[in-house]
Amino acid sequence: MLFSNYFKILVMKKLALTFVTAFLSVICFAQEGGGTKDVDVNISTGNDANWYASPWVWVVGAAVFILLLVALTRGSGRRSD
């Protein structure tokens, strides 16, 4: 008797999950407009590029990072013997 109640609950859970999944799938497909969208993409290669696109910025940033790394790992240089 206990096994049949567990089986019924399991079947009901699976059916509920199936219906919820099917419903969500219908909602997701309903989101598509069906028509084509006109997308305008402007790619600028002129002088108005972002500041982080310049190579010198990366070189300076790497140099500062290395200097900070050396300064932090080196410590004070004194030992307390």
Image (spheres, rainbow, N blue to C red):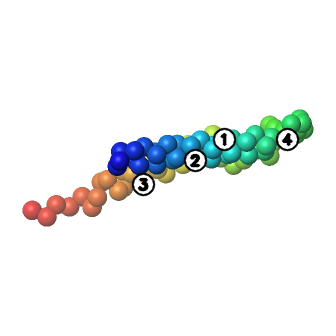
**Residue of label 3:** 68
Mark 1 or 2: the one toward you: 2
Q: CA distance from mark 2 to mark 3?
A: 58 Å
**Residue of label 4:** 33
Q: Earlier in the sequence, mark 4 or mark 1?
A: 1
Residue placed furthest toward the bottom:
80
Q: CA distance from mark 1 to mark 2?
A: 10 Å
Q: Which mark is residue 16?
A: 2
Q: CA distance from mark 4 to mark 3?
A: 53 Å
Q: Is residue 74 left or right of residue 7?
A: left
Q: Earlier in the sequence, mark 4 or mark 3?
A: 4
Label 2 secondary element: helix
Q: Which mark is residue 22?
A: 1
Viewer-proximal residue, 32 or 41?
Answer: 32
Q: CA distance from mark 3 to mark 1?
A: 56 Å
- Place residue 46 in its image quadrant: top right
Q: Earlier in the sequence, mark 2 or mark 4?
A: 2
Q: Is residue 68 left or right of residue 40?
A: left
